[in-house]
Image: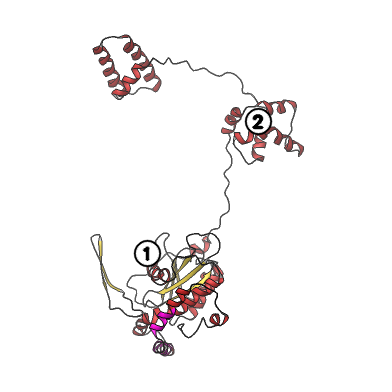
Amino acid sequence: MSMSTQSRREYLNSMKKRYLETKSKDEKTKIINEVIELLGYHRKYVITALNNHPVYLKPKRNRNRPLKYLEAMPVIESVWEALDYPCAERLHPVLFETAKQLAKHNELGLNPTISEQLQLISRATLARRLAKWRSPKRTLPQAKPDFKIRRQVPIGIYNWDEQRPGALEVDLVEHNGGSALGHFACTLSVVDIVTGYSRRRAVLGKGQKGVFTEIENILKSWPFAVWGFHSDSGGEFINDHLYRFCKKTGLDFTRSRPYRKNDNAHVEQKNRQFVREIVGYERYDSPEEVSWLNEVYALLDPYVNLFLPMRKIVFKERQGAKIKKRYDIAKTPFKRLIDKEVVTDETKTSLLTQYQSLNPLAIHRQIEMLLARGPVAISAESAQNEESSLVLV
């Protein structure tokens, strides 16, 4: 049986009287059982409630008194707005002084009655009146990606068994040392998912123009034709510069789904192996440190592409909750390029010449020396030789 709260209180009060008046233990038990059965309360709660003295409900009084300070309400609202909608605790001490200030500038009118009410109103009364008003919600402008461009760049993902070289994945690795405040260096990482050929380049900041310039420079020196360009949805990639460039050069420009790193799995794997495990997680935020990173990458890129073998998945099958994978024989990106026959004879000759002229152990030692030295100031001669013969054509 459903009972209103008022009825429950009245019933419980009447049972309290009976319970406190009776002396028999059996009679008290019967009263407790009756209350439990009717109200559904817990036995311990019923015993506690019945042992307390009855609460006599007072009849609700209708307040017939008229509200006070009605004349001052429009003035209070104007002051409240002028002070950016503060709470009563902040508004009350300065209410009258601010009203006089606004009256000086003809924003509102004051008369003796309103002035008296402004000085007499209490903080509690002011709080009750303010609670009935709603301050407008302010929407602050925020830096957002160009949604027009974002709508024009479709969400996509390469097939895991893609066979056409030229499908690039690109990402930006931040070197902020755990704090996103201020300017810091980023590594632009580009990889072809079919051959594993990859390039890296450091840039100071995540500005669209700076990142685009490095992308353009990397693609100009890419040794074979590119047909696809896939990035995440960051503003450094989803912008007019890159969109117009891809449209002009005929690249299929796609982006990852939000919060899905596996949509960019190949470049993410390269980021860990050839960026994080090489230069670490330190903060680099000066031009000298950016130059040092690029000096490392000038040695690392040919070392990775010409000499470091990699394996690719050739078979993948889901078996319940697990995925069974089979990999091919390890080959270098350089060997995969030759096998795919995607480079011109001139580029092939240049790569072979570079491969035969380089000593992988010497390059490895040079990289170790650079990493041990750390990002110190680089001489003008070293900066000029940054794009030396070690960089792939």
Residue appearing at x 30%, y 25% in the figure: 42
Q: Amino acid at mark 2?
A: Met
Q: Judge by depth and name the residue closer to the eye, 301 or 18.
A: 301
- SS at mark 1? helix
Q: Position of residue 13 (x, y in %)?
A: 37, 15
> Is 91 drawn above or below residue 283 in the view shown?
above
- Kind of residue sitting beneath label 1: Asn
Residue 85 in the image: above or below residue 287: above
Q: Secondary structure at mark 2?
A: helix
**Overall secondary structure of the magenta section:** helix
Label 2 neighbourhood size at 10 Å, few (<14), some (14-19), many (20+)? some
Q: Position of residue 141 (x, y in %)?
A: 58, 53
Marks 1 and 2, how far apart at CA? 60 Å
Q: Earlier in the sequence, mark 1 or mark 2?
A: 2
Q: Quadrant of residue 134?
A: top right
Please name the residue that numbered disc 1 is placed on: 262
Q: State which quarter of the image contains the N terminus.
A: top left
Asked if residue 226 can be seen in this view, the reply is no
* Highlighted magenta segment, given as a residue range: 347-366
